[in-house]
Amino acid sequence: MAGAEQTQPVSPKLPQSVLFCCDQNAVRSPMAEGIMKKLYGHDVYVQSAGIRSDLDIDGFAIAVCAEIGVELDRHRTRSFEEMEKRGDEMSSFDMVVALTPASRAEAAKLTRFDHLELEYWPVTDPSGALAGDGREAKLAAYRKARDEIVAYLQSRWGAPEAI
């Protein structure tokens, strides 16, 4: 279904390849990539990218993922353009999961002629103004986003083997 967009679970069967995307590839999409690899193993090719890649991986994202055994320290941000230059064409993925409205629009535009699933999972922006002040408030906001990602993954593909 070219350019088709799903928001509800279609099948518990894991796709062969998934691309998670957000605006900067610094918080939500790398969290989703790492968590999916942790929960569902390496049988699925999982990557992440952003519309832009002008930020480094967020330290709070690294911290809250480490709490559940997901290592993000070595993640390097990349944009859709950088991804394609390295040979990862968006059209080669079975599924693209957009985590922000802007990445949803960009992914829809870039894949409009491709045969892949496009899903939108509106994960809360933990780095936004509503995150609050102070380290504990920020960590709570990032944990909320992390837990939303876990819930989306489990809703879509069932209970994982590990977390």
Image (tube, rainbow, N blue to C red):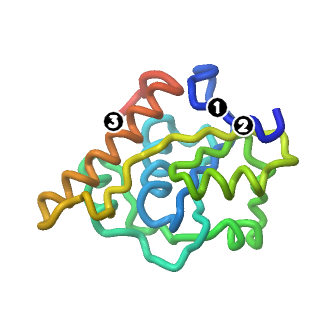
Q: Is residue 53 above or below residue 99?
A: below
Q: Which residue is mark 2?
A: 117
Horizontal side, residue 47 vs residue 134: left or right: right
Q: Residues within 10 Å of mark 3 (few under 14, many from 20)?
A: few
The label on residue 6 is 1
Give the residue at mark 3: 163
Position of residue 25 relative to residue 69, above or below, is: below
Closer to the camera in the image, 89 or 140: 140
Residue under the image location 43 percent in, 28 percent down:
160
The CA span between labels 2 and 1 is 7 Å
The C terminus sits in image quarter: top left
User: What is the quadrant of residue 149 in the picture?
Assistant: top left
Which mark lies nearer to you, 2 or 1? 1
Q: CB under 8 Å between callouts 3 and 1?
A: no
Q: Nearer the viewer, mark 2 or mark 3?
A: 2
Position of 31 compared to 110: left or right? Answer: left
Which residue: 57% across, 23% down?
9
- Residue drawn at 34 percent across, 47 percent down: 145
Mark 3 falls on what kind of element? loop
